[in-house]
Amino acid sequence: MSLEHRALLYGDMESFVEATVPFLESGLEREQAVIAVAREPGLSALRDILKPHGNAVLYFDSARFYEHPVRTLRDYQTIVRQSEPRTVCALAEPVWDGWTELQTREWVRYESLINVVFAHSGARALCPYDTAQLAPRIIEDARRTHPVVVGDGHDGANDAYVDPARLGMGCDRARRFDRPGASEYMAIDGADLHALRAFVAERATAHGLGRRPAQNLVTAVNEVAANALQHGVPPMGLWIWRDGDDLVCEIGDNGFWRPSPLTGFIPPDSALQRGFGLWTVRLLVDLMELRAGWDGTFVRLHVRR
Amino acid sequence: MRWASKAAGAAYAERVRDNPDGQAMDAPWFAKRPVSAVRPGDHAWLAYSGAEERDRVIGTFVQEGLRTNEKVVYVTDAAPELLPGLGPAHRVDVEAYARTGQLRLISRREACLDRRGGFEPAMMLETLGREVDLAFGQGFRAVRLTTDHSWLLSGPGRPDLGPMLGCEHRVGDAVSPSTMAMAICQIDRHACAPDELLALRDTHEVLVEVNPEFDDGILKIVRTFEPNGLRVEGELDAARHAVFAEKLTQVSADRHRVHLDLSRLGFIDLGGLHLLARHATGLPAGRALVLDHLPADVEHVIEMVGWHRLPGLARGDGALPETEGVS
């Protein structure tokens, strides 16, 4: 079962409704599990129009569904899994305002990863993009992340589509990895990470992180450090600094590693699969960056207070 | 009688509150100690689940006493070779210890039964007082007292709980200020009703348990017997995976379902979750690894990744037990 992943370019509410309602109804006809994740006021419009179908369609507000790309991908995967043996028909409208440059890049990557994670799910996804509101480069990115583009004069064919692994590589290459001089450093030597955890927990609390995010950061740092101890090359250490509301932790080692650009992005089926650790680290923090270069392997974790 | 005296000092072992919600104002406070940390002044309680747990606690109590020039007083009708720490496997020369007075096995009739065979608390107290007095004169630095009360609470013609509670209170009053005497009262936790067990437990200030399987100050692993499993306290990380996996394998050897009491687990790394799932999937079909009393922070991580990604792990009891030292 293949995946149908289309971007819908729309300019006003009328064209939004004209395209999305038949899409959702076709899902109901095919006895798919139908969900509508959309921004307001489009979401309310759909609820009204599709009222005759009662509870057959599940509705989610994009503002709540799109808060963290790795978690959103996980949530879609949960829906796909729980709907089995039915396949899923999803209207999936992302949120593009309010993100930093870094976050926007991760959301673009997320859209691209859909093509990999659900490749064999038999799902159909239609992702609306509001051409009247969104910046042109967001629309350009939509063309790079969706094999098919419809609406606004597009007939489906899209030669701007980029393979997810290549797109991911591009995201990583665009990254700057300078570190402020005011960062604190703690060497990671010996096998016991107890002191490192205590250090990070103390800095997290001082930064004003809540108990849960602080604990999550400690778990994430511990995982990356344990991974460096197991696979990396000394010297290794942790840098930690504040960047506005963000607390940033970077764990580096001198090892040479060439991870796939999809490493740690694909939700593993179980904790026993490779990649479980890195994927969970991405879930635990607000944003994780990985840079594997000639000078070593560096994992940067961001948590906002 | 001479119980010797000591200033009332606070127990330095961690104190655990009976009722985790803190609502019950009259809830007693206990010190919980591994058996090797029991010391003079302790009037301790062991509600054992079976012979293995009893033998590991009382056997250690008895043997450590004999090894360190302390007197051991055991009120029992059982033959010495059937007693914890004194059986053939332990190669203890019971008769030699008995000759020197370091080991005193006293029958119930002699220790605490009246002429009609009824339980007489005052006699028990006199017996214990006498033995402590003697020990002082014999030059022993301490006296370890123990007896199993289970027989009193089961079988026909069992006395009311009242005299027993009274007896325990008086023993406690006598032992607590002592600089020489320490006592462990044993009971088979299945010998009486749960409320009676609680009432009896509450007459003790110290809960005794087996020595930890492992304790490096960061991670502590303690064997539990009912349910069968381990209590994991502190922080479980990569530096401690190997020892934890070893203990987990040991406790999974028989056909019992394995429970992990995680109520005092402060941290588990992702490798630790992986380890749990890997162990659980290696168990015979249908035998889950049960995680009891998951702390909120740990449960949060599990829920974030999803229970289905941790095959073989099952969520057990949620709330902390309110019956510490009993169940």
Image (cartoon, rainbow, N blue to C red):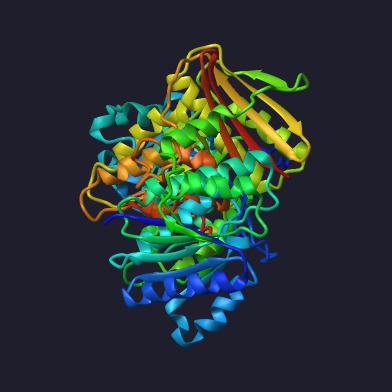
Q: In which quarter of the image is residue B81?
A: top left
The image position of residue B259, as x and y in percent, is: 37, 51
Extreme residue toward the bottom, this view: A52
The image position of residue A271, as x and y in percent, is: 38, 43
Number of numbered labels in the structure image: 0
Query: Is any part of residue B75 visible from this angle?
Result: no
Q: In front: B322, or B306?
A: B306
Quarter of the picture containing the C terminus of chain B is: bottom left
x 31%, y 48%: residue: B51
Q: In front: B54, or B93?
A: B54
Quarter of the picture containing the N terminus of chain B is: top right
Does residue B87 lie above or below B46 as drawn? above
Q: In this view, does B112 lie to the left or right of B31?
A: left
Q: In front: B279, or A188?
A: A188
Does residue A16 lie above or below A148 as drawn? below
Query: Is any part of residue A117 visible from this angle?
Result: yes
x 55%, y 68%: residue: A60
Q: In this view, does B155 lie to the left or right of A261?
A: left
